[in-house]
Amino acid sequence: MKRNSRTDRRAFTLIALLVVLAVLAILAAMLLPALAKAKQRAQRISCVNNLKQDGLAVRIWEGDNHDKFPMAVSTKMGGTLEWVAGGNAFRHFQVMSNQLSTPKVLVCPADTRQPARDFGHLENQNLSYFVGLDAASKDPQALFAGDRNITNGLAPVRTVLVLPPNQPAGWTETIHGGTGNIGLSDGSVQQFSTPGLQTAIKNTGRQTNRIALPE
């Protein structure tokens, strides 16, 4: 009888352990999706904050340079006008190093890219954001910057993509899962779905919107 009692107690302990493990597995299966969504939300918020800082930086830079964004100021005067041709997205941010303070605000936490260690080593691969080459403070709805996973089916020319209002545009799944963030010339930042992005492009009032992709 004693041997059977011990066997029963051991069996009960093993069953209890298996029940506990099963409950923990169920709880984990329920909580992991919620945790993943919370992480994605935090990354989107951080991305929005980065673009707000980028927008503030260009407005400060503009105030010191005759109310012009870097893309409209010659390199001889500290701008990036001669770099608009293509392949130079990083240079438009690089000239604002004093206003940006740290290269970390140029990388979205949802992106796989890593920030440069300093602005002297900044390259396109250290950017998560495109630059709107036609952005200007006089056009508050112009696209100043945004997530690099933007697309409209057209082929970029030397990493410059044109976004006509009549050409469907959207987002790849690369960063925010089919959505994206756009910083406008007025300093505001908005999260756009694909339909919202198309509306934003139309709201610029431009027949073409040139953006420099960090490729």
Image (cartoon, helix red, strand yellow):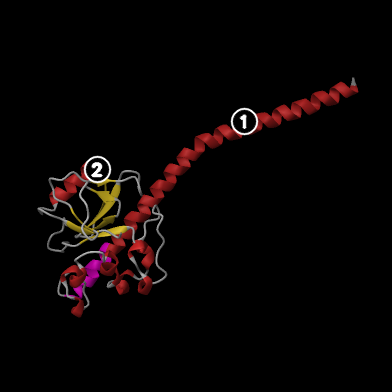
Q: In the depicted view, which residue is nearer to us: 10 or 145?
A: 145
Disc 1 designates what residue?
22
> Could you tell me if the residues under marks 1 and 2 are in contact, i.e. CB atoms within 8 Å?
no
Q: Which residues are magenta?
A: 55-65
Tell whether 28 sits left or right of 99.
right
Secondary structure type for disc 1: helix
Q: How many marks?
A: 2
Quadrant including the C terminus: bottom left
Instruction: Identify the residue at horizontal 50%, vertical 38% (top origin).
Output: 31
Secondary structure type for disc 2: helix
Find the residue positioned furthest to the right.
2
Report x, y in % for residue 40. 40, 47
User: Quarter-wise, where is residue 49 in the image?
Assistant: bottom left
Report x, y in % for residue 74. 17, 75
Residue type of the residue flagged with mark 2: Thr
Report x, y in % for residue 126. 37, 63
Disc 2 designates what residue?
194
Which badge, 1 or 2, is on the more N-terminal residue?
1
